[in-house]
Amino acid sequence: QVQLVESGGGLVQAGGSLRLSCDASRSMLSINTMGWYRQAPGKGREFVADFSSGGQTNYEDSVKGRFTISRDNAKNTVYLQMGTLKPEDTAVYYCNAVVLLWDGTKRNYWGQGTQVTVSS
């Protein structure tokens, strides 16, 4: 089991910045992948950024160069630094963790989400 708690969302003007945090209830060294997804009103949940199992970072094209994912293993926390925010970044942002089970299957865990609203 992994509990994920996001924080750091809020209202910001276009061009501004926010940093999201995701606190995991267990060591991230035991988690295969950790990252962020978002869901805008009326749309499906989409990938934003993550750390893959090899430790490399991956980003959705529209956030490359503006968002940075980072981690603090000692705190079991993943961050998403968001800069040059645009109104189209408005969404509920969800933290995601993928755990590889002993039988080779994967289990997804999600946080409760944090709202990010970018005003124009």
Image (spheres, grey):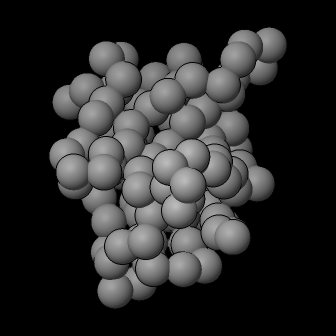
Point out residue 22 in the picture as x, y percentages from the top left corner. Answer: 54, 64
Q: Quadrant of the C terminus?
A: top right
Residue at horizontal 31 percent and vertical 30 percent from the top: 59
Residue that protrudes farthest toward the right in the picture: 42
Q: Is residue 42 left or right of residue 47?
A: right
Residue 98 at least partly seen: no
Residue that protrudes farthest toward the top in the picture: 42
Q: Nearer the viewer, residue 22 or 105?
A: 105
Q: Is residue 33 left or right of residue 37?
A: left
Point out residue 73 in the picture as x, y percentages from the top left corner. Answer: 33, 78
Q: Nearer the viewer, residue 112 or 67?
A: 112
Residue at horizontal 72 percent and vertical 14 percent from the top: 43
Residue at horizontal 24 percent and vertical 43 percent from the top: 57
Residue that protrudes farthest toward the bottom in the picture: 74
Quarter of the view holding residue 78: bottom left
Residue at horizontal 43 percent and vertical 71 percent from the top: 30
Q: Is residue 84 left or right of residue 56?
A: right
Quarter of the view holding residue 68: top left
Q: Quadrant of the N terminus?
A: bottom right
Point out residue 119 in the picture as x, y percentages from the top left corner. Answer: 60, 28
Q: Nearer the viewer, residue 72 or 119?
A: 72
The answer to whether residue 56 is above or below residue 6 is above
The answer to whether residue 32 is above or below residue 65 is below
How many marks the image carries: the answer is: 0
The answer to whether residue 91 is above or below residue 17 is above
Point out residue 35 in the picture as x, y percentages from the top left corner. Answer: 45, 47
Residue 88 at least partly seen: yes
